[in-house]
């Protein structure tokens, strides 16, 4: 319906423009004036001629008004329906525009809140970074203090362990130690010795190794015996502080009646090395070596002044060197 109306209006406008252009290109002749009643009553009379300087009145262009065609009832109803739809759409557009405005307002408020929250988060993050730096510094200082405390505790523990070690350390000495002739208990010359615990803790003796050697004072060959060994088992090797375990006897092939007389007269030198394998109640090892030489003048065994080696062979070599030096032993 609107299309038809638009077409009719466009057609009318075109016709109006065409008529206007024709009117301007071909002007109409001026109308003749109608004779007045006087002139009609006197047709034969003298007519006054117009003045020579009298001009004709200007003529107006014609105006054409095109009336639209009358609308039918259906077209009017359709137009009303379209106007109603347009009004409804306008109302909905207004409503949607209002809702959009409310949504934009809410979005603006949310954006402001988000900006404030972001600023707050930035401030909180900066604070956390600062506190993290402080905490890291404090932790490093705490770790350093803990390390120093741990070292001090370790040192204290070592001192305590050493103190406990010293407080419970056994110390075995060979006492008594005698060179004996044959008697009712032993049919041959022998060496009688005992083990005394002079330390502060219980000593558990596991093994006692003995090396006996005789060396002629004036030339001759050297004879060694290294097969004497004493082992305590079944817990009999435990020696309390201040206690002495007696009754050990050493008999050797190199220690006969003739050798005994030569030793006591100084013609032969007797050397003996004790190697003791023991431990305390905490199973800490205490291994001791005693190199001894028989003094024929005092008739006692004396400790060698040389520092013994960590094995029997080294101790024997050191003792032999001392014997050669003191007894004038020739190679």
Image (cartoon, helix red, strand yellow):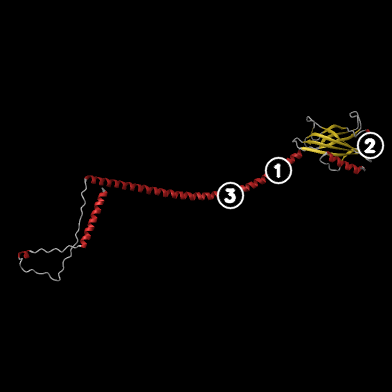
State the image coordinates of residue 131 (x, y, percent, origin top left).
56, 49
Of the pair 243 and 229, the residue shown nearer to us:
229
Q: Residue furthest bottom?
A: 52
Position above or below: 2 against 62? above
Mark 1 or 3, closer to the camera: 3
Sequence-first tag of 2 and 1: 1
Instruction: Indicate the secondary structure of the residue bearing disc 2.
Output: helix
* Observer-nearest of 194 and 286: 286
Residue picked out by circle 3: 134
| Looking at the image, residue 176 lies above or below residue 11 | above
Q: Nearer the viewer, mark 3 or mark 2?
A: 2
Q: Badges 1 and 3: C-beta atoms under 8 Å apart? A: no
Are discs 2 and 1 less than 8 Å apart at CB? no
Mark 3 crowdedness (10 Å alpha carbons): few <14, some 14-19, many ≥20: few
What residue does disc 2 label?
262
Q: How many marks?
A: 3
**Where residue 70 sits: x, y (%)?**
20, 49
Residue topped by disc 1: 156
At a point 27% along the width and 49% down the height, the residue shown is: 3
* Precedes in sequence: disc 3 or disc 2: 3
């Amino acid at each position: 319906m609107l299309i038809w109306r638009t077409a009719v209006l466009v057609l009318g406008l075109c016709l109006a423009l065409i008529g206007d252009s024709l009117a301007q290109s071909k002007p109409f002749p001026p109308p003749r004036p109608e004779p007045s009643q006087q002139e009609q009553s006197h047709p034969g009379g003298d007519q006054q001629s117009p003045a020579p300087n009298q001009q004709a009145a200007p003529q107006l262009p014609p105006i054409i008004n095109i009336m639209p065609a009358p609308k039918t009832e259906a077209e009017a109803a359709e137009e009303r329906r379209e106007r109603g739809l347009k009004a409804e759409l306008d109302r909905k557009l207004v409503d949607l525009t209002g809702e959009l405005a409310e949504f934009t307002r809410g979005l603006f408020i949310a954006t402001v809140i988000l900006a404030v929250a972001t600023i707050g988060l930035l401030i909180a993050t900066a604070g956390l970074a600062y506190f993290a730096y402080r905490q890291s510094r404090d932790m490093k200082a705490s770790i350093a203090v803990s390390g120093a405390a741990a070292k001090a505790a370790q040192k204290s523990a070592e001192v305590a362990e050493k103190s406990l070690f010293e407080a419970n350390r056994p110390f075995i000495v060979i006492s008594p130690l005698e060179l004996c002739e044959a008697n009712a208990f032993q049919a041959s010359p022998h060496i009688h010795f005992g083990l005394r615990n002079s330390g502060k803790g219980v000593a558990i003796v596991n093994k006692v190794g003995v090396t006996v050697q005789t060396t002629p004072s004036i030339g001759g060959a050297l004879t060694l015996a290294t097969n004497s060994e004493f082992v305590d088992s079944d817990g009999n090797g435990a020696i309390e502080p201040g206690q002495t375990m007696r009754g050990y006897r050493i008999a050797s092939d190199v220690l006969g009646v003739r050798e005994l007389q030569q030793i006591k007269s100084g013609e032969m030198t007797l050397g003996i090395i004790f190697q003791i394998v023991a431990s305390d109640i905490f199973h800490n090892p205490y291994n001791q070596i005693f190199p001894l030489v028989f003094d024929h003048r005092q008739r006692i065994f004396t400790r060698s002044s040389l520092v013994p080696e960590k094995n029997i062979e080294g101790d024997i070599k050191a003792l032999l060197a001392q014997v050669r030096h003191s007894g004038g032993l020739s190679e």
